[in-house]
C-alpha cells in the first residue's frame, strides 16, 4: 500500500468540495410560485371530484352529492344548534299564549256588556227578578223530583201497570186544574183590593195576576163585589169598563175585588210587596190592598171545557 492510499480525510474533502467563491447560489422562488406549486388548478380538482360520466360522486350514505351550500367556498353550512331550536319553540309557545289571552279578553268584554242591563236596573226591579227566579227554581225542582219518582215507578216492572194508570189520572187532574175545569184546594193567599173611592184599573189586576204567576201561583180566581167569580187561566183577559168596573173573560165585575190564589203564601206575598210592585201602585192610586195567608184556600169557580174541532193529538 502506498502513501497515496493513505491520504488524510481533509485532503479528500478539499478535493471534493469546490471553493466557496466558485459555488453559485441557487435563486429562491417567489411566494406566488410556491403557492402555485402547492395549490393544484381548479380543473384538476374538478377532474378528481367529478367522474368522466358527468355524474357527481356518491356520498358515504349512498346518495348523490347535492349542490354546494351558499357561503364562503370550502366552508360547510352552519349546523342548526339546540339553542336555535329552543328559541323557535319558545316563540311559538308565546304566540299561542298571546292568542289565548286575546280570546279570553274578548269574551270577558262581551260578558260585561251583557251584564250592563242589570247594573243599571233599579233596586226594586232586582228584588223582583231575584224573587221570580227563586220561585221558578223551586217549582222546577219539585217537577224534577216528581218526574224522577214517576220514572222509578214505571220502570219497577211489578207495579208498572198500576203506576201508569195512577200517573195518567194525576196528569188528567193537573190538566183539569190548569185549564180551570176542576175546583182546587191548597195553601195560599186571599187578597182584597179596595178602590177606596178610586176606580181600580184592569191593568193593575193584570199586574197582580202576573206577579202571582211568577211567584209560583198555580190556581186562582177573581171575585167581584157583585158576586161574579171568574176562574183565571192562561187565556184570561182584562178590560176596563164604564163606572170603574172591569170585564174579565166577558164577565163584568165591580170592586172591591177578592183574589184567591193557591201556592206558597210567603213567596207570593213578598212578590206583591216589593218596592214599586202591585201593592205600592194600588196605594199610590188611592186604593188599599190587604193579604191573608191561609193553610187552605178553596177555588170553586170553574170553566166549561172547550170542544176542539180541528186539533188532534199526534200519537
Image (cartoon, rainbow, N blue to C red):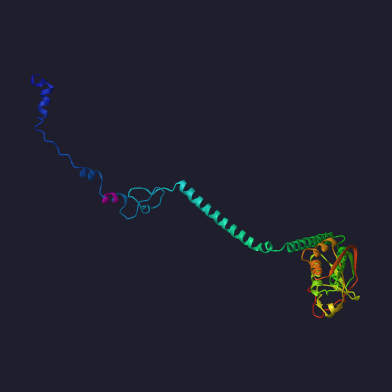
Residue 249 visible somewhere in the drawing: no
Examine the image and state in which quarter residue 28 appears: top left
Q: Main secondary structure of the magenta part?
A: helix
Residue situated in front as seen by the camera: 223 or 279: 279
Q: Position of residue 231 (x, y in %)?
A: 86, 73
Residue positioned 85% across, 79% down in the render: 243
Question: Looking at the rendering, in which quadrant would you find the C terminus?
Answer: bottom right
Q: Does the magenta-highlighted stretch encompass residue 176?
A: no
Looking at the image, residue 55 sits to the left or right of residue 130; the answer is left
Residue positioned 28% across, 49% down in the render: 45
Residue 48 visible somewhere in the drawing: yes
Looking at the image, residue 33 sits to the left or right of residue 128; the answer is left
Q: Provide the residue span drawn in magenta.
A: 42-46
Task: Identify whether 312 is placed above or below 44.
Answer: below
Residue situated in front as seen by the camera: 146 or 299: 299
Examine the image and state in which quarter residue 250 appears: bottom right
Examine the image and state in which quarter residue 225 appears: bottom right
Task: Identify whether 86 is placed above or below 135.
Answer: above
Q: Position of residue 194 (x, y in %)?
A: 86, 71
Q: Position of residue 100 (x, y in %)?
A: 57, 56
Residue situated in front as seen by the camera: 187 or 171: 187
Residue situated in front as seen by the camera: 119 or 47: 119
Amino acid at each position: 500500500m502506498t502513501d497515496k492510499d493513505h491520504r488524510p480525510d481533509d485532503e479528500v474533502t478539499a478535493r471534493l468540495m469546490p471553493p466557496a467563491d466558485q459555488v453559485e447560489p441557487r435563486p429562491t422562488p417567489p411566494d406566488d410560485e410556491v403557492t402555485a406549486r402547492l395549490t393544484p388548478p381548479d380543473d384538476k380538482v374538478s377532474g378528481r371530484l367529478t367522474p368522466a360520466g358527468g355524474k357527481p360522486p356518491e356520498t358515504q350514505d349512498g346518495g348523490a352529492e347535492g349542490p354546494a351550500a351558499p357561503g364562503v367556498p370550502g366552508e360547510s353550512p352552519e349546523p342548526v344548534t339546540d339553542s336555535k331550536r329552543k328559541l323557535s319553540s319558545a316563540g311559538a309557545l308565546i304566540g299561542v299564549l298571546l292568542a289565548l289571552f286575546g280570546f279570553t279578553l274578548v269574551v270577558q268584554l262581551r260578558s260585561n256588556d251583557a251584564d250592563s242591563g242589570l247594573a243599571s236596573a233599579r233596586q226594586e226591579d232586582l228584588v223582583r227578578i231575584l224573587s221570580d227566579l227563586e220561585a221558578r227554581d223551586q217549582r222546577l225542582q219539585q217537577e224534577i223530583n216528581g218526574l224522577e219518582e214517576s220514572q222509578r215507578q214505571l220502570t219497577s216492572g211489578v207495579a208498572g201497570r198500576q203506576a201508569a194508570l195512577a200517573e195518567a189520572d194525576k196528569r188528567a187532574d193537573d190538566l183539569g186544574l190548569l185549564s180551570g175545569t176542576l175546583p182546587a184546594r191548597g195553601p195560599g193567599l186571599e187578597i182584597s183590593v179596595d178602590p177606596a173611592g178610586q176606580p181600580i184599573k184592569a191593568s193593575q189586576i193584570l199586574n197582580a195576576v202576573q206577579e202571582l204567576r211568577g211567584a209560583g201561583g198555580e190556581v186562582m180566581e177573581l171575585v167581584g163585589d157583585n158576586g161574579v167569580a171568574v176562574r183565571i187561566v192562561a187565556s184570561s183577559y182584562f178590560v176596563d169598563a164604564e163606572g170603574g168596573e172591569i170585564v174579565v173573560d166577558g164577565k163584568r165585575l165591580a170592586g172591591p175585588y177578592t183574589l184567591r190564589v193557591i201556592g206558597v203564601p210567603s213567596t207570593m206575598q213578598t212578590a206583591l210587596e216589593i218596592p214599586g210592585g202591585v201593592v205600592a201602585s194600588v196605594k199610590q192610586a188611592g186604593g188599599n190592598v190587604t193579604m191573608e195567608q191561609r193553610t187552605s184556600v178553596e177555588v170553586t169557580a170553574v170553566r166549561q171545557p172547550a170542544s176542539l174541532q180541528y186539533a188532534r193529538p199526534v200519537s
